[in-house]
Image (spheres, rainbow, N blue to C red):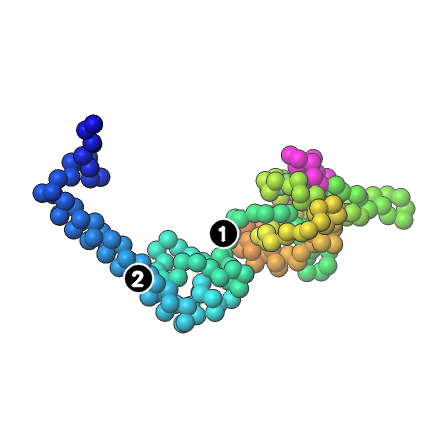
Amino acid sequence: MSQTPPHDRNGRVVTDDNLGPLLTGMARGLAMGLAITLRHFRRTLADYWRGIPGSRKSEGAVTQSPTDDGLFTVSYPEARLAVPENFRYLPVLLRDDDGSIRCTSCGICAKVCPPQCIWIVRTTGSDGKPVPEPAAFTIDVSICMSCGYCAEYCPFDAIKMDHRFELATTERWTTLLHQKDQLLVPTSYYARIHPTDYAAEEAERRAKEERDRQKAAATA
Ligand code: SF4
Ligand code: SF4
């Protein structure tokens, strides 16, 4: 029975004549790969001891680019990769500096939410009339699919998408129902994680106030 002669990776038949060059090429490739590994190891070790961002000694969010040299891993949870500004996980409600809640309990977010995981109870005043503030605001975060529609459609910039994602829990029935007090965050927090959107919204708000002022002055 005839045996198939050995082939190199380019399909050429390996004979005694070309076996030597083939082994030499393989050894050269192996040496080059090991040299790259050793270079990264050396730089990683240096980064580690210097404590540069991304190394085990550093704390807080870090950014990592494909062109980074040296240490490629992030020592989570001491260090974290910074998420992009437009990253969205779960919704939060905004509370302004004066303590007021922006949400008027209009219910638009609950209507547009595709999986219907928002429930709102409007506040009722002592006179029995509705007060534009939620008495209860609940989001079932086990159902929320982070689409951001609620934030997109809210006419009062009252609900925004958060960056926090470490919300694992060992209980799935009550802890995954985020309630109003848990959902509320200061507007300054939103301004910090979404600076571009916040600046654009504030500029639009100031422009509207100016238009309203001019209109009022014109009709006075
Ligand atoms: S978060 Fe916005 S859309 Fe939802 S109820 Fe409040 S004001 Fe309306
Ligand atoms: S992000 Fe989407 S799924 Fe989650 S509460 Fe908002 S609208 Fe609903």
Q: Amino acid at mark 2?
A: Leu
Residue displayed at 18% across by 34% down: 5
Residue 99 lies, in percent from the top left, at 73, 59
Check disc 1 and report the residue beneath it.
84
In the image, the segment drawn in magenta is: 107-118
**Pick the front one: 151 or 43:** 43
Mark 1 against mark 2, which lies toward the viewer? 2
Residue 150 lies, in percent from the top left, at 64, 41
Q: Real-space Cα distance between discs 1 and 2?
A: 32 Å
Residue 34 on the magenta segment = no
Residue displayed at 90% across by 49% down: 126
Quadrant that contains the N terminus = top left
Check disc 2 and report the residue beneath it.
38
Q: Amino acid at mark 1?
A: Pro
The quadrant in which residue 47 appears is bottom left
Mark 1 residue CB less than 8 A from any atom of ligand 2: no
Residue 108 on the magenta segment = yes
Query: Sequence-wise, which precedes: disc 1 or disc 2?
Result: 2
Q: In the displayed image of the protein, which residue is found farthest to the left? A: 17
**Pick the front one: 43 or 196:** 43
